[in-house]
Image (tube, rainbow, N blue to C red):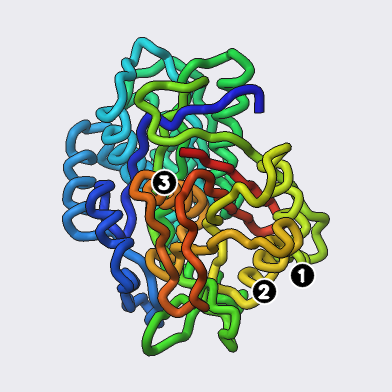
Amino acid sequence: MKELISITSFASVSALGSTSEEIWKNYLNNHHFLTLKEFESFKAWVALLTEEDKYAIEEVQNSDNKYKNLDPSVLYTLFVARKAMEQTNWKASDNFGINIGSSRGATSLFEKYHKEFLKTGKSSTLSSPTTTLGNISSWIAHDLQTNGPEISHSITCSTGLHSLLNGVAWLQSGMSEKFMIGASEASLTDFTIAQMQALKVYSKEKNGYPCKAFDLNKPKNTMVLGEAASVFCLEKGIKENALAFIEGIGYATEVLKHNTSVSTNAECFQKSMKMALGTIPSDEVDAIIMHAPGTIKGDQSEINAIQKVFCNKTPFLTTNKWKLGHTFGASGLLSLELAVLMLQHQQVIEVPFAQPQEHPKKLSKILVNAVGFGGNAVSVLLTK
């Protein structure tokens, strides 16, 4: 990278809450925040937003008559984008850029409108504009009144970190001085859960921890889905109000052997981590926030890749999906949030059922990983 990128604010909403204080407090305990939810024809573990946050999001929806028919994925992002904006010195006249992605997009509305069409043979008037992929970024730009560039994309579970890649590219090109990046996922529907169950990756655990992400001895897959949204405000160069700095970025894509495949040693992760490190010695990395989705192959292949890159000096490893579920496109940014909080508090967060690890004496550099179906890997190196 040409120069450091400053993270000047961030905000998220997930099963852990919506304030940094609440989220960090919930990271400090060994409880998971997964709930067994009743769907139309089955029960499944999911990570739901709190009732308090749902009420606050409903207030956002009621703040503008045009927001009444928006999908939850948009409303979640409106909620966190406003919070992140309040924490910066940004103004609408700055014309900052916006890139909000989503793996599934307007899931609830799309399924609702499709059911109506199958039943009546007609489509609702707003079915198209409220379900398009650019829906989220456009509404955020409207709400924050910026005239900067708006980008939307979907790259499965690495969508959020691909937003960061785009933001960094715009900033380093000189085409923008400030960029808001993010991702949102509100896809806890019967159909989405059924899709994951059809892939044989969804958790069937009845006791203990439903998601065993980073448990390398689990006998079966234990993925659990969650809902969330997260945004980060990025600025070029070293800013006095920076919470952390992006020091390196890396990305790679594997040649597909199967729609959901990743190689045994996750070659895409090896490439993305090496690219993010650049010329920085690997032993300077103090911790890695893993993607670790809770599947047997997904967890193990990432570990294999880390061992290949870091050889005999593996950094402290952790993940948050055992606690707040896999939030698809938003997952990478929730991992980035955890990394920033760990840097701020100088404390690692352990996975309670994982093998004990030696804690680093200090936290100066943390690597964050995310990968999506098809081997779209991204790694981001944060520094204090």
Residue drawn 40% across and 78% down?
44
**Residue 28 in the image: x percent, y percent?**
30, 63
**Do the numbered discs 2 and 1 sit on residues whose CB atoms are within 8 Å?**
yes
Which of 118/209 is in front?
Answer: 209
**Residue 163 in the image: x percent, y percent?**
55, 37
Q: Is residue 209 left or right of residue 269?
A: left
The residue wearing badge 1 is 264
Which of 120/89 is in front?
Answer: 89
| N-terminal-most mark, 1 or 3 | 1
Which of 17/216 is in front?
Answer: 216
Which of the labelled discs sits on residue 343, or is there none? 3
The residue wearing badge 2 is 297
Query: What's the distance in space between the residues labelled 1 and 3, CA to CA?
Result: 31 Å
What's the amino acid at mark 2?
A: Lys
Q: Residue furthest front?
A: 361
**Residue 349 in the image: x percent, y percent?**
40, 62
Residue drawn 63% across and 56% down?
372
Residue 254 visible in the picture: yes
| N-terminal-most mark, 2 or 1 | 1
Q: Considering the numbered disc 2 on the image, is that residue within a helix, a strand or a loop?
A: helix
332 above or below 148? below
Q: Quadrant of the N terminus?
A: top right
**Residue 207 in the image: x percent, y percent?**
37, 89
Query: What's the distance in space between the residues labelled 3 and 2, CA to CA?
Result: 29 Å
| N-terminal-most mark, 3 or 2 | 2
What's the amino acid at mark 1?
A: Thr
Residue drawn 28% across and 40% down?
79
Q: Considering the numbered disc 1 on the image, is that residue within a helix, a strand or a loop?
A: loop
Q: Is residue 200 left or right of residue 142?
A: right
225 above or below 92? below
